[in-house]
Image (cartoon, rainbow, N blue to C red):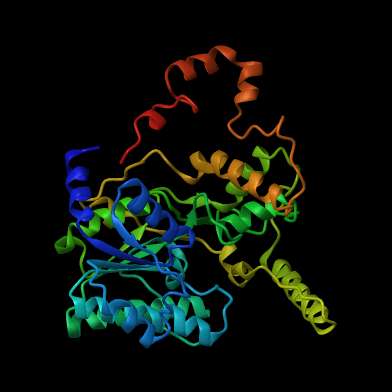
Amino acid sequence: MTNNATQINDCLKNKLGIIIGGSGLVGGSIVHFFKKKWGCNILAPNSKTLSIRSEDDIKNYFASLRPDFIVNSAIASIDSNPQLAFEINYIGSINLARVARSLGIPYIFFSSAAVLPSGSNLSESDSLALQPSMSNYAKSKLMNELTLEHLRRTEGLDYTIIRLAIVYGKHDHKIQGFHRLLFSVADQSMPLLFTRKGTCHSYSNVQKIPYFIRHILSRRDEFGGQIFHFVDQQPVELAQLIIRIRDYLLYKRPKNIYLPYPIANFGVGILHSIMKLFNKIGIEARMPPELMFLKSFYEHQTLSADKLSQSSFSDPFPEETVYSQLPEILQYYLTRWEQMNLISSFDKEFFDPKKLAEDFLNAPESLLTAIHNNEIQPFSAKDKNNVT
């Protein structure tokens, strides 16, 4: 641990933080690092303890607490109806922002790449125009960004907005987002490539987020009233990622054939009709909510990380990317989904995402050298010297 990180930890240990959405992938990671890894005083109330939709709940909860910061990573399900999306994603967030303003403490809010148009190297100053046709999720996130800036100008709110792209990591209890993609390939329910060749997206590593939160809480002069894209430096081509997952699993599908968007969209429309028919006869059936973003699978969208890289924050794991983490992520989720009987069992004897068995068979000398040089787990240098 560096002296700088030690000073930050010592400072945070004397403070109380409130994490909203602590049961989710992002919030859960923040709670784990702050509370269990760094020993900070963190509360993560669930919706039964604190409903951010209720002003009375918020007043009662914060009446006896004077936290030093609030982090909001809570969201309604991405396919929620307009009322739920509005009340949780927007009203609830602004309720928390007003609490932070009244207490004079920082408010950290997680936004999304959904507020951005398609395109390459999009900056923090880019955003879509607010309009009725936006998805409920994107609309609520964009409204948050606009209102938080309004509160900064008119009431002096100290906020930082963190825009995330496609978040990847372990310990997500729901099959959603990036993990829906993993599941589709693992379950062999993706026969073809539902994308266009060359379509790239940005990705956000959930393990790095707590380090950024810790850093910006100690440097409000630099990060207050700012939006930051928290993404890996290099974007990823969606088709290549799907193929990499398929190859790790030693599957033959999806085939290396790109399904045109009009055909994919037509097929989704037919499935929607079938689902409605099932529901009418009493059989509960739902489409994956991510299909509302089907068009995004075919549109190029990459976020610039220049502002982040030019700040005082240093990436704790610069070598980690979605590709480098893919073997561990696959191992974790395949085991979990198999135990839950969500996918058919895979052959553990041949499941070799890191290709170690292949190296053992064909290049034992190289494998031995890599192990001796602490380049591969379970003997990796990173495991011995964790960044903290």
Q: Residue lying at the far front in this picture: please name it.
A: 64
Quarter of the image where the N terminus is located? top left
In the displayed orientation, state which residue is furthest to the top.
365
Residue 369 in percent (x, y) is at: 48, 14
Please, which residue is most extreme toward the right here? 281
Residue 345 lies left or right of residue 73; in this view the side is right
The quadrant of the image that shows the C terminus is: top left
Q: Residue at x 75, y 56 (%)?
A: 189
Is 227 left, or right, of 138 in this rendering?
Answer: left
Please state which of residues 318 and 3 is positioned toward the viewer in this rendering: 3
Task: State left or right for residue 213 relative to residue 281.
Answer: left
Residue at image point 23% right, 53% down: 13
x%, y% of residue 73? 41, 67
| Quarter of image, res 271 | bottom right
Q: How many marks?
A: 0
Q: Tell me if 139 is positioned left or right of 360 in this view.
A: left
Query: Is residue 231 visible in this depiction of the protein?
Result: no
Query: Residue 277: in sight, yes or no?
Result: yes
| The residue positioned farthest toward the left in the image shown | 221
Which image quadrant is residue 212 in?
bottom left
Q: From the viewer's perspective, is residue 129 above or below residue 300?
A: below
Q: Measured from the top left, where is residue 179 in percent x and y?
A: 59, 55
Residue located 44% across and 58% down the image: 28
Q: 3 above or below 220?
A: above
Q: Position of residue 311 (x, y in %)?
A: 22, 53
* 362 w.r.t. 327: above or below: above
